[in-house]
Image: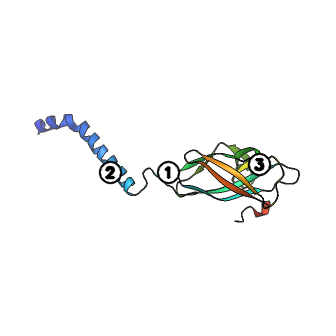
Amino acid sequence: MKALRDRVEPFLPALSAVVASAVALGGLTAWTAAGAAGSPAELEVTHARLLQPFPGRESTAVVFTVENRGNSADRLLSVDSPAVDSAMFSRDADAGRAAAKMQMIDSVEVPARGTLEMTPYGTDVMVELRGPVELGQRIPFTLRFRQSGTVTAQAVVVRHADWASR
């Protein structure tokens, strides 16, 4: 028995590497067969609203709904428009005592097979408008994503009370 163990023992590290590789290859094969391997994000902006600024103000929020039908997550890096001087992502953060404060963030994740739904009371894009806008006006926006490149959308100018209407 000792002689057999002495002959097999030098090969145990190699055998464990072979078994680990076989398990990994089996997992990757199953992932590929399920259609998930190499599948990029598939993004569509389905809802874009620019909130009409309050009288005398140039700053407001724009919200987007981004659907991702792909198997990979993506990240929204920036938003731009010829109608705005600046745009930055923000979200409401808990300030205690049932209050919220605005927190600036660098980017926003769009989950795989999920939806990024921006709201004026959660994550949105704060913009400084270059000029006045009118209710119902369509404003072009370009959304830049890490993996998917750019996607364009037309945001409709709405009253604050109507931001969720589709």
Which element type, helix, strand or loop, lies under badge 1?
Answer: loop
Residue 95 in the image: x percent, y percent? 73, 48
Is 35 or 118 nearer to us in this picture?
35
Q: Which mark is residue 24?
A: none
Residue 24 in the image: x percent, y percent? 34, 47
Image position of 94 with respect to 6: above or below: below
Colour scheme of this structure image? Answer: rainbow
Residue ID for mark 3: 83
Residue visible at 38% across and 53% down in the picture = 32
Rate crowding at label 3 as few (under 14), some (14 to 19) or many (20 or more) other CA atoms within 10 Å.
some
In this rendering, which labeled residue sits more in front, label 1 or label 2? Answer: 1
* Mark with earlier residue (2, 3): 2
Counting the numbered discs, the total is 3
* Mark with earlier residue (1, 3): 1
Image position of 15 with respect to 154: above or below: above
Residue visible at 73% across and 45% down in the picture = 87
Rate crowding at label 1 as few (under 14), some (14 to 19) or many (20 or more) other CA atoms within 10 Å.
some
Residue visible at 44% across and 50% down in the picture = 38
Relative to 152, 162 lies left or right: right
Give the spatial CA distance, label 2 vs label 3.
52 Å
Residue visible at 57% across and 44% down in the picture = 146
Residue 160 in the image: x percent, y percent? 79, 60
Q: What amino acid is labelled 2 in the image?
A: Gly
Which element type, helix, strand or loop, lies under badge 2?
Answer: helix
Quarter placement of the N terminus: top left
Residue ID for mark 1: 40
Give the spatial CA distance, label 1 vs label 3.
31 Å
Q: Which mark is residue 26?
A: 2
Is 95 or 157 nearer to us in this picture?
157
Give the spatial CA distance, label 1 vs label 2.
22 Å
Do residues under tags 1 and 3 come within 8 Å of each other at their CB atoms?
no
